[in-house]
Image (cartoon, rainbow, N blue to C red):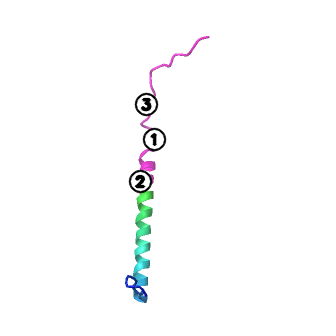
Amino acid sequence: MQSGEYPVRSSEQPAQRWENLFGMAIALLTLLLPLWAIGYYSQPDSGSFVESRYQIPTLKK
């Protein structure tokens, strides 16, 4: 065994598992929450749409 290596204790495994799950949950929230917020707030309201009175001129040949 080299001087820089330490044996892994069996009592450290469950804590590491919880840390991995917690990190994964934070990563998923970091990725999905902004996408959900953008999708939720960018949906057009059908009642707030105002039709323009400006007529687009047509091209004549």
Looking at the rendered structure, the kind of residue marked 3 is Val
Asked if disc 2 and disc 1 are in contact, CB closer than 8 Å, the reply is no
Image: 59 above or below 12: above
Q: Disc 3 marks which residue?
A: 50
Q: How many marks?
A: 3
Circle 2 crowding by C-alpha within 10 Å: few under 14, some 14–19, many from 20: few
Q: Is residue 57 left or right of residue 26?
A: right
Q: Residue at x 44, y 38 (%)?
A: 47
* Drawn side of residue 14 relative to residue 61, left or right: left
Q: Position of residue 28 (x, y in %)?
A: 45, 63
Which residue is at the far top?
Answer: 61
Which residue is depicted at the point 44% across and 54% down? 36
Asked whether 54 falls inside the magenta stretch, the response is yes
Quadrant containing the C terminus is top right
Mark 3 or mark 2, which is nearer to you? 2
Mark 1 / mark 3, whichever is N-terminal: 1
Read off the magenta span. Answer: 34-61
What is the x, y in percent for residue 7? Answer: 42, 87
Label 2 – label 1 distance at C-alpha: 18 Å
Q: Which residue is mark 1?
A: 44
In what element is the residue under mark 2?
A: helix
x, y percentage for residue 42?
43, 44
**Residue 45 found in image quarter:** top left
On residue 16, the disc is: none
* Front tag of 2 and 1: 2
Q: Main secondary structure of the magenta part?
A: loop
The quarter of the image holding the N terminus is bottom left
> Which residue, given by chain and number where applicable, does mark 2 sit on?
34
Above or below residue 38? Residue 53 is above
